[in-house]
Structures are given as structure tokens and as C-alpha cells.
Amino acid sequence: MERRPPGEHSAQPAGRVPLAVVVVDGDGPVLHWNSGARRLFGVAREEAVGADSPGVRMAVPDRCKEAWESFWRETAVRDYDASLSVKSHLALFEPFVDGSKPVVDLGCGSCATTRFLAERFARAAGVDLSRVVVEHARRADPSGTAEFRQLNAAEPEQVRALHAELGDADVHLRAVIHQSEPAARPAIAAAVATPAGRRGRAFIVEALAVAKTVIADAVRDAGGPPPKIARVFAHGLTPAETEDETVPELLQETGLSALASARADLVMTECRADGSSRTGLPTQWLVAGR
């Protein structure tokens, strides 16, 4: 199935994200493919309708991977201040873990978070869909404080292989599910549960639905949106596209139970255009386990 290159179908105003509606007949053909799906996945309706749904599903993770690779190629992957987020989050997670098991930083993005976790856990593995991020992380950590590898969390075989290597592990997941393709979200929730196994605990931080309003306000700021937020939309990424109950429900379907939860702002590195304040995204955090 031929897909248009990124950018050819991304002439969407900043801050507006197309709603993709796809209807498939089980593992059979695609029955409906709207204009939002065309813009988001880069596959024309004429190509998609009638095609086997497995072939279409292959296009979705490929599009997502391409979007993140292009985003990080144009974004300075730098060490973020861990005190802005993970340090305060770890204080919530620590009562449920003892640091004796490995920790998997799922969707690690900047390597700073994984290295911060490596100081407190027996072994820290940062995994990310983006090859660009992983290559940067390895260069930025020449002493090998943590380990980094490219992994598609929506591919169960890759996740099972990670669990086979590490055994039951604690898992850190921050702001991954709400930016993922809807079709991939159950698999990503399973990618939290699989490494955790029977003994591990997972700490999940995901944007609340109201975060979409915060992002939209930043986009409409008189001085323009912060550069990183502008690039998110330019590359077809879709933040804060989940309802508040989505993440707890997905985790529950994997067999994980919420052991604790609360709401707090996720402080981003991006400041308002006038430099007056950092952007804070309303989030929910959960500690989960079996």
C-alpha cells in the first residue's frame, strides 16, 4: 500500500488535529476510511477501502514511527532537568518499589530520565520507538549508566523478548499513550503489563483531556506557540487525544490494578512565548501492579 510522504498530507492549521474514523470487518477488508484517516495516515480512501485490514494496520505504526523520527531530527534532543518531573514523580513511586528489580523507561525520549532512574534501580533500560533518540542517548551516556535500545511498544514480540531478558521489572511510562494512535493504545498498555510481570510495579503519567485546552491556549498565544509544541503538530503528532478514563481502563484490561492515583501538572521545559512561565500539562498518575 503506497503512502504519501509526511508533509504532503499535513497542511493542517496548528492546534487542529483531524479525527480519523476507520471501520474494518474483523481481519477482513476496510469498510470505511474518512478524510481524517487520509490526512493522518497518508493513505487515500480509494486505496484503503476494500484493502485487507492487516495491511492498513501496518501503515499506522509505520506512520507513527516516521512522524517521531522526523520530529526528533528537527528537535534538539537535550538533557532535560529531571527535577521538573521525574524527581517529583519518583517520590510517589518509591513507596511501591525497592530498587532491586530493573526498571524499564518505556518511551524514554530524552535520556535524562532513564539515567536519573539508573541511580535508584539495579538496572535501567530506556526504550523508544525513535532511532534518533536512542542513538543520542547512547552518545550522551558514554559511561553506560543506563542502557538504551530501539523498541516498538506496540509490537508484542519485542516486548516479550525484553521481559524474557530482564525478568519482572518496574516500569516508568510518561506521556506515551495519549500521543499514540488509538489502534496502538491497547498494545502499549500491554507493553506496561508484560515487563512488570507478577512482581513489578508500573508508574504511569498521562495527560488529562483538559490538557488539550492548555495546549490550544499555548498555540493561540500572542507570541506564537512554543517551538516544540509547534513542531508536534507540524509532524502530525496528536497530544492529549484520550479521555480521562481511557488509561485506567486499558491497564485494567491487561490485568493490572491501580494501587494509587492522583492528579498533578506535568511541568514541561517549554516556556510561554514571553518567557513568563513554563507550560504545565494537567496529568493523572497511577501506580499499578498485580
Image (tube, grey):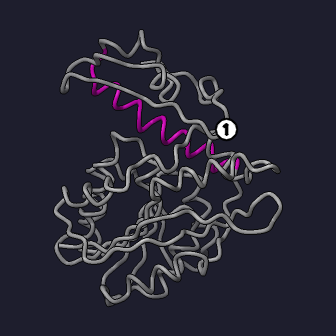
**x and y, in percent, of residue 255 in the image:** 16, 62
Q: Quadrant of the N terminus?
A: top left
Q: Nearer the viewer, residue 224 or 185?
A: 224
- Total tally of numbered discs in the picture: 1
**x and y, in percent, of residue 179 in the image:** 47, 49
Residue at 41 percent of width and 12 percent of height: 47
Q: Which of 44 and 144 is in front in this view?
A: 44
Q: Which of 76 and 279 is in front in this view?
A: 279
**x and y, in percent, of residue 72 in the image:** 63, 50
Left or right: residue 199 compared with residue 93: left
Helix, strand or loop at mark 1: loop
Dominant secondary-structure state across the stretch colored magenta: helix
Left or right: residue 64 compared with residue 286: right
Left or right: residue 150 compared with residue 82: left
Which residue is label 1 attached to? 14
Is the residue 238 above or below the residue 109 in the image? above
Residue at 30 percent of width and 77 percent of height: 260
Q: Quadrant of the C terminus?
A: bottom left
Is the residue 17 above or below the residue 262 in the image? above
**x and y, in percent, of residue 104 in the image:** 38, 70
Residue at 67 percent of width and 45 percent of height: 231
Instruction: Name the amino acid type tagged 1.
Output: Ala
Is the residue 48 above or below the residue 186 in the image? above
Q: Which of 39 and 263 is in front in this view?
A: 263
Left or right: residue 156 compared with residue 172: left
- The picture quadrant where one finds residue 6 is top right
Is the residue 57 above or below the residue 159 in the image? above
| Span shown in magenta | 51-74
Residue 241 included in the magenta stretch of the image: no
Residue at 31 percent of width and 86 percent of height: 97
